[in-house]
Image (spheres, helix red, strand yellow):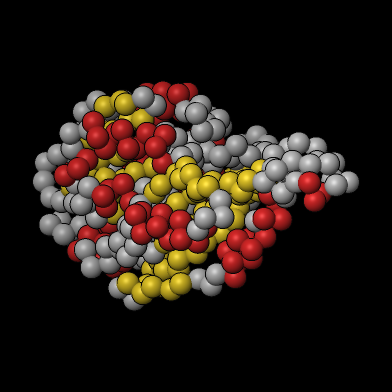
């Protein structure tokens, strides 16, 4: 690369950093709580339709945007359009921070994807690049539209690497833990609380089970030098709602079991059944598989060389698992702040978003096969 070409590239990078800030604010100004993604999907599709690449393929309120198809490895950048329902003021920028629902999780990642598409010289890219924007990530596994997109779109199962732009503070989060939610129902018999011996208290019947769950230590598993933890937690509890002077005949708890990538959904369900035993009824309400890390993949290693400072295990579930189930390597990398995800008055650092844009730009323009 000549000195003139390098100066041109540096200027383009600076202009892209400025545009990614504007784009993040634009995205945050479009409300998109889960189930209400149509407006933001329409807006993103309309904006990207101005690019010279092929038209977007739409599935519900999700779109797949093929940008280049000439040469090199096939890469997909993936981001969800929806946010959780939290209390947030109007979208705004104050100092280094952009405030707004989804600013961290994950409209910062979406902003990087959009500006990359608009600022890169797509004809010169040494890779085949596709963008995926999808709906309903913040809900149950089965309702997530990425599942339907992967089933229907002709190209995605053949990509060489998918990058889920989840908030990770520009750290590389590899793999993900699986997640099982189970509704555990303890049953008893009602009675007047003045004569509790005439009934059977479903709440106190659960005491032993709750103590056992609370005493379970995290189980650590090391994969490729990364430590994942299998944990089990009671996250919700409610009684039958009969009244404050009635011995409850029903007590329901939600148990969330997170398991390391070496485990399976079948093993996780068997573990929970064994934990409950005959004390209660178990109904599995949400099943999400785990994903192994792809630390040795050449494209992942090149991403690290482009400036990633930290590599960590993903101690949570993300949609890398959906790609992994198809045999497609996938990683988590995004500029949003992990600690801000799902927070009231959510915000993220603009400096991080700019940094994430520059790093992804450097990676995409220099993947193996590039003349530079």
Q: Is residue 174 above or below residue 143?
A: below
Residue 203 visible, this angle: yes
What is the quadrant of residue 172 in the picture? Answer: bottom left
Q: Position of residue 188 (x, y in %)?
A: 67, 46
Q: Residue at x 56, y 39 (%)?
A: 84
Does residue 365 appear to the left or right of 87 in the view shown?
left
Nearer to the camera, 280 or 85: 280
Nearer to the camera, 333 or 351: 333
Q: Is residue 342 above or below residue 292?
A: above
Q: Is residue 73 above or below residue 134?
A: below
Q: Position of residue 205 (x, y in %)?
A: 67, 55
Q: Residue at x 45, y 24 (%)?
A: 38
Does residue 324 appear to the left or right of 72 in the view shown?
right
Q: Position of residue 156 (x, y in %)?
A: 22, 40
Q: Residue at x 53, y 47 (%)?
A: 281
Q: Residue at x 22, y 47 (%)?
A: 326
Quadrant including the N terminus: bottom left
Nearer to the camera, 320 or 41: 320
Quadrant including the C terminus: bottom left
Residue 52 visible, this angle: no
């Amino acid at each position: 690369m000549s000195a003139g070409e390098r100066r041109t590239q540096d200027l383009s990078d600076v202009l892209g950093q400025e545009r990614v800030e504007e784009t993040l604010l634009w995205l945050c100004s479009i409300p998109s709580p889960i189930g209400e993604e149509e407006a933001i999907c329409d807006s993103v599709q309309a904006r990207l339709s101005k690019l010279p690449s092929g038209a977007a393929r739409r599935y519900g309120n999700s779109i797949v945007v093929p940008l280049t198809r000439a040469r090199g490895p096939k890469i997909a950048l993936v981001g969800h359009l929806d946010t959780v329902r939290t209390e947030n003021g109007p979208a705004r920028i104050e100092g280094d921070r952009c405030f707004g629902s989804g600013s961290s999780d994950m409209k910062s990642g979406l902003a990087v994807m959009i500006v990359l598409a608009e600022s890169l010289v797509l004809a010169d890219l040494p890779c085949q690049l596709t963008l995926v924007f999808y709906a309903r990530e913040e809900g149950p596994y089965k309702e997530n539209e990425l599942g339907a997109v992967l089933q229907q779109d002709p190209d995605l199962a053949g990509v060489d690497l998918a990058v889920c732009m989840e908030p990770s503070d520009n750290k590389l989060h590899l793999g993900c833990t699986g997640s099982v939610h189970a509704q555990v129902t303890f049953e008893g018999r009602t009675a007047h609380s003045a004569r509790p011996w005439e009934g059977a208290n479903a709440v106190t019947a659960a005491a032993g089970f709750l103590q056992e769950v609370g005493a379970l230590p995290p189980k650590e598993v090391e994969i490729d030098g990364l430590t994942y933890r299998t944990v089990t937690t009671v996250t919700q509890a409610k009684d039958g709602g009969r009244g404050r002077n009635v011995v409850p005949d029903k007590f329901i708890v939600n148990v969330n079991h997170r398991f390391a990538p070496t485990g399976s959904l079948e093993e996780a369900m068997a573990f929970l059944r064994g934990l409950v035993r005959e004390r209660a009824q178990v109904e599995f309400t949400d099943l999400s598989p785990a994903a192994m890390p792809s630390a040795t993949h050449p494209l992942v290693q090149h991403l690290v060389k482009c400036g990633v400072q930290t590599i960590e295990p993903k101690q949570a579930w993300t949609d890398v698992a959906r790609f992994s189930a198809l045999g497609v390597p996938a990683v988590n990398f995004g500029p949003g702040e992990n600690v801000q995800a799902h927070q009231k008055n959510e915000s993220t650092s603009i400096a991080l978003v700019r940094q994430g844009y520059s790093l992804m730009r450097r990676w995409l323009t220099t993947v193996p096969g590039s003349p530079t």
